[in-house]
Image (cartoon, grey):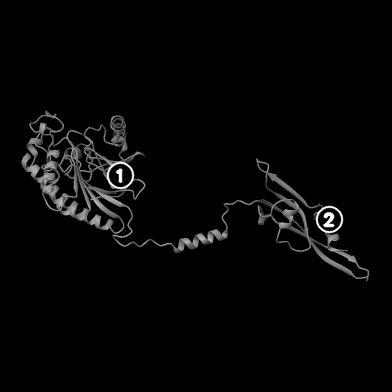
């Protein structure tokens, strides 16, 4: 008896003919199934001929290895010479499925592991290959020079000059891996305390008169300008209007009795501009100084930014800012276009991601409020925040530092 004849005989355990049981997808195509009674004269490792027998493309289907089952039996018959021959025959059953094009193989995993082990942090040479130009934003918020609390003038000046030194160190660190070419120094408002009109004890507790306070502000701003702008290709000084420096309050009125434009912070920004305009080495510095606008706008490293002091914004958190901004955007297209907003006045650091824009609320440089701490126990850290802006990051900003 030939092998073919013996294979045509049903095995002792699987007395069924070769069969394919298919499963179909919604589109009517075969997605998988089962083979039973598949016979072979030896151990079977290749199923291509089985798929072809059932009119399936072996390139599109695969056997599920852990479903293969085999049975074997012996077949014997006396030959014409009187001898008997004995052969082992096999029958198989297994499940199959359509191959998925995105299946991850062991080879894929091995290749991925090799790539992961070989990856190293890029080594960049400072000044070369550091990417898009970015700008450093340095925020001088609520210095309130002349305020007696928190150590008074001397302690505030120490914080400000420490902040200048820390900012220089931060820029040096960032320039190892960022192309920092532009500096924006911001007067976020209330650079001096004022002498009256903001709270009842103000005219009894300030440590310097209005003239002395304003000279202190010019000393600080001049030091920052002198030490920092020369090391940048481009510079900006941005100033906002605020409440403590309204000239119309200095006579003791709780409300300003002149217009918003009559503001000491704006006057000092104009004074600094006049000084730098005639000082060699500062012709690359541009100024943004409001007349009577509460919000000012500029662009740093191609990122549109908005600034204000924040004393006209109701509430002290993200909800209050968002409500205010939604209203502003109806009448001021620039408010809507700003990708980054910076405010102050709240004397504490906050950050808000509002989707179309990102908001920062700056901490104060003054020594804090004894009244707030005595009545609520709350206090916030004095300091200066700086960060980078530019197209180097999807948010338009990165690397916030509390200095």
Left or right: 38, with 235 as reference point: right
Near-viewer residue (2 or 285): 285
Res. 278 visible in picture: yes
Residue toward you, 22 or 28: 28
Which quadrant would residue 338 be assigned to in this image? top left
Q: Which of the numbered marks, if any, corresponds to residue 303?
A: 1
In which quadrant is the N terminus drawn? bottom right
**Residue designated by label 2:** 10
Task: Report the residue at 13% width, 41% height from top.
Answer: 270
Depth check: give the residue in front, 399 or 363: 399
Lower position in the chain sequence, tag 1 or tag 2: 2
Q: What residue is shown at x 69% (from left), y 45% (from top)?
A: 23
Mark-to-mark CA distance, 1 and 2: 80 Å
Q: Nearer the viewer, mark 1 or mark 2?
A: 1
Q: Can residue 220 be spotted in the picture?
A: no
Q: Horizontal and vertical percent for residue 272? A: 12, 45
User: x, y (%) of residue 38?
Assistant: 77, 55
Quadrant hosting residue 25: top right
Position above or below: 156 against 109: above
Say above or below: 298 vs 17.
above
Horizontal and vertical percent position of residue 382 = 20, 46
User: Is the residue 179 above or below the residue 350 in the image?
Assistant: below
Query: Which secondary structure lies at badge 1?
Result: strand
Secondary element type, mark 2: loop
């Amino acid at each position: 008896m030939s092998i073919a004849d013996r294979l045509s005989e049903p095995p002792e355990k699987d007395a069924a003919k070769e069969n394919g049981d298919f499963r179909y997808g919604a589109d009517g195509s075969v997605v998988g199934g089962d083979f039973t009674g598949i016979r072979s004269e030896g151990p079977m490792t290749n199923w291509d001929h089985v798929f072809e027998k059932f009119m399936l493309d072996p390139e599109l289907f695969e056997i599920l290895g852990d479903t293969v089952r085999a049975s074997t039996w012996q077949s014997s018959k006396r030959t014409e010479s009187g001898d008997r021959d004995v052969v082992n025959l096999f029958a198989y059953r297994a499940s199959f499925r359509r191959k998925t094009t995105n299946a991850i193989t062991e080879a894929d995993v091995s290749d991925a592991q090799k790539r992961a082990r070989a990856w190293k942090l890029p080594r960049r040479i400072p000044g070369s290959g550091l990417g898009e130009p970015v700008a450093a934003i340095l925020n001088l918020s609520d210095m309130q020079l002349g305020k007696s609390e928190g150590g008074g003038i001397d302690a505030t000046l120490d914080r400000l000059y420490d902040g200048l030194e820390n900012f220089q160190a931060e820029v040096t660190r960032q320039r190892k891996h960022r192309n920092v070419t532009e500096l924006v120094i911001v007067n976020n408002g209330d650079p001096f305390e004022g002498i009256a009109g903001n709270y009842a004890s103000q005219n009894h507790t300030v440590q310097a008169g209005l003239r002395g306070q304003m000279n202190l502000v010019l000393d600080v701003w001049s030091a920052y300008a002198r030490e920092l702008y020369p090391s940048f290709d481009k510079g900006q000084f941005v100033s906002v209007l605020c409440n403590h420096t309204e000239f119309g309050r200095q006579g003791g009125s709780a409300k300003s009795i002149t217009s918003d434009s009559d503001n000491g912070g704006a006057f000092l920004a104009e004074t600094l501009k006049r000084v730098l305009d005639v000082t060699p080495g500062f012709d690359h510095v541009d100024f943004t100084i409001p007349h009577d606008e509460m919000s000012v706008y500029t662009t740093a490293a191609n990122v549109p930014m908005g600034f204000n002091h924040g004393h006209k914004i109701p509430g002290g958190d993200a909800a209050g800012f968002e409500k205010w901004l939604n209203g502003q955007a109806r009448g001021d297209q620039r408010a809507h276009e700003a990708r980054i907003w910076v405010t102050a006045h709240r004397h504490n650091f906050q950050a808000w991601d509002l989707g179309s824009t990102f908001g920062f609320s700056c901490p104060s440089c003054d020594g804090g409020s004894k009244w707030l701490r005595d009545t609520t126990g709350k206090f916030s850290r004095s300091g200066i925040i700086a960060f980078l802006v530019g197209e180097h990051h999807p948010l338009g900003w990165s690397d916030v530092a509390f200095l």
